Amino acid sequence: MSRYEELLEKIRDLSLGWDKEADDILNEIYESNRHHYNIRIGIGRDSYIGIYEGEQQMERFHYEGQCNKIRAFKLACFWLLNHSNLKEDKRAEKIKEINKAIYELEEKIGEMKEEVRQLKRQEEG
């Protein structure tokens, strides 16, 4: 399981809101990120968790009531994770797996071509 997938599971398991586990997840995402995002929490009539890069709002997750606040927080964490270098690492892992499979197939094709050549020589001889 990649680090991206591990963090994805940890975010899904968050149930208490912004506790030490959530803080550790956010710190790891922050350290692996090419951008430096800020989280802002709006309260009142327009309750939201917003993600900003500098002063530019990148995303906003609205919530009504305490019960939906953890959902909005998880969505914000998912967004940050999906926009981090950890997601790119997952893509790099997948590319590596595909390239390995291609290499193995090319080896197998080479073996099969050699077998065909040997069979043709036996036919001729």
Image (cartoon, helix red, strand yellow):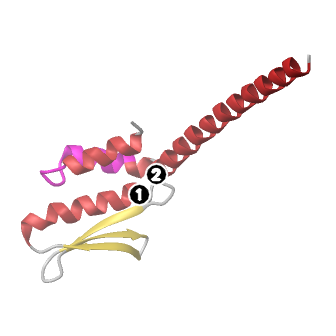
Residue lying at the far right in this picture: please name it: 125
Give the residue drawn at x 40%, y 63%: 37
Q: Is residue 55 left or right of residue 40?
A: right
Which amino acid type is marked by label 2?
Lys
Q: Is residue 60 left or right of residue 118?
A: left
Q: Is residue 6 left or right of residue 15?
A: right
Instruction: Determine the main secondary structure of the stretch shown in magenta.
Output: helix
Give the residue drawn at x 36%, y 44%: 5
Q: Nearer the viewer, residue 107 or 116?
A: 116
Residue lying at the far bottom in this picture: please name it: 45
**Total residue callouts:** 2
Residue 21 counted in the magenta span: yes
Q: Nearer the viewer, residue 52 or 89?
A: 89
Secondary element at image label 2: helix
**Mark 1–mark 2 distance (CA, rounded to whole Å):** 6 Å
Secondary element at image label 1: helix
Counting from the top left corner in percent of width and height, residue 68 is at: 13, 67
Circle 2 residue = 87
Q: Specify the segment rendered in magenta.
A: 14-28
Give the residue drawn at x 36%, y 62%: 79
Q: Nearer the viewer, residue 101 or 66?
A: 101
Check if mark 1's residue and mark 2's residue have beta carbons within 8 Å.
yes
Counting from the top left corner in percent of width and height, residue 34 is at: 51, 56
Counting from the top left corner in percent of width and height, residue 62 is at: 21, 75
Give the residue drawn at x 17%, y 76%: 47
Residue 84 counted in the magenta span: no
Counting from the top left corner in percent of width and height, residue 22 is at: 24, 49
Circle 1 residue = 82
| Viewport quadrant of the C terminus | top right
Which amino acid type is marked by label 1?
Asn
